Amino acid sequence: MEIVLVPGMWLDGESWGEVAEQLEGAGHRVRSLTLPGLASRDEDRRGIGYDDHVGAIVEAIDAASGPVLLVGHSAGCDLSWAAVDRRPDRVVRAILVGGLPSADGDALVGGYDAVDGEIPLPDWSAFGEEDLRDLDDAARERFRALAIPAPAGPLAGPQRLADERRLDVPVTAVCTEYSVAQLDEWLAGGPAWASEFLAIRDVERVDLPTGHWPQFTRPRELAELILARAGAAAPAR
């Protein structure tokens, strides 16, 4: 199976290291993406926009030799879903880790102040205790050592979705710092912020109890979850 891993804010392809190793060890072809503007702290990120990030994911899908299992984390869930919209016939399943897709016309991420077109990783005090669960001192040091300011342009959006066939692509929503039960409670009544997610026709909800960054705190469990979906999605030989 071709597996494409899309990181969230402040992270490059290396952040998937332990997860990718386990997937490759099981025989899958893995691409851990470093999105435009996230290859170096020294890059000028002011000109990078939404189309650059979505285009990089679409390019990885197009480069695959077969159907793709697409995995997005956090803000990478929005970007991955936009790529699904552009290639609904190439993605066999989208796994969304710690995030839900924004609706057409919405911004992807809010609540962070941009400086010169980029958003630096804030102090840990900016995050909730649930986000930081299991992220011990060593993991925090590793995270901050890897962290690169996120380009602000892609996160401002707006999200652009046009192909209704995206809603037929199966989705696994991995609940990390919140539980499936909490998610279901939030979704009761059909809130507008979840309209895109609620429109998807085949959704699996899975608990992975940890903080917001399971690629650091529960890499083996996350890899096993992905492997199970990869096995189910693999075409018959």
Image (tube, helix red, strand yellow):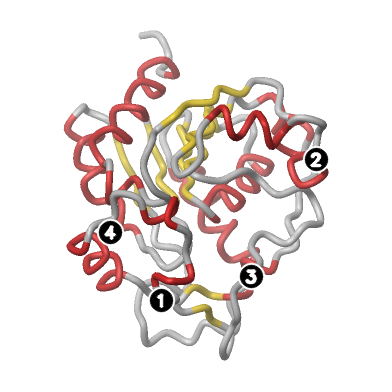
Distance between the Cα atoms at labels 3 and 4? 26 Å
Q: Which residue is mark 2?
A: 191
Checking the image for residue 14, the label placed there is 4
User: Which quadrant of the rendered structure holds the C terminus?
Assistant: top left
Name the spot of residue 61 as percent of width and height, x first.
49, 43
Name the spot of residue 52 as percent of width and height, x first.
58, 66
Q: Which residue is mark 1?
A: 123
Q: Identify the element where label 1 is drawn.
A: loop
Mark 3: amino acid:
Gly
Distance between the Cα atoms at labels 2 and 4? 35 Å
Seen at 70% across and 49% down, the residue is: 102
Q: Nearer the viewer, mark 4 or mark 1?
A: 1
Name the spot of residue 225 as percent of width and height, x first.
35, 27
Seen at 42% across and 68% down, the residue is: 10
Q: Which residue is mark 3?
A: 111
Looking at the image, residue 191 sits to the left or right of residue 11; the answer is right
From the viewer's side, name the closer residue of 80 and 30. Answer: 80
Q: Are marks 3 and 4 in contact (CB under 8 Å)?
A: no
Residue at far bottom of view: 116
Residue 105, located in which quarter of the rendered image?
bottom right
Residue at far top of view: 237
Mark 1: amino acid:
Asp
Q: Identify the element where label 4 is drawn.
A: helix
Seen at 48% across and 34% down, the residue is: 174
Looking at the image, residue 25 sits to the left or right of residue 74; the answer is left
From the viewer's side, name the closer residue of 208 and 119. Answer: 208
Mark 4 crowdedness (10 Å alpha carbons): few <14, some 14-19, many ≥20 = some
User: Which quadrant of the rendered structure holds the N terminus?
Assistant: top left
| Mark nearer the N terminus (1 vs 2) | 1
Distance between the Cα atoms at labels 3 and 2? 20 Å
Looking at the image, residue 103 sits to the left or right of residue 46; the answer is right
Residue at far front of view: 129
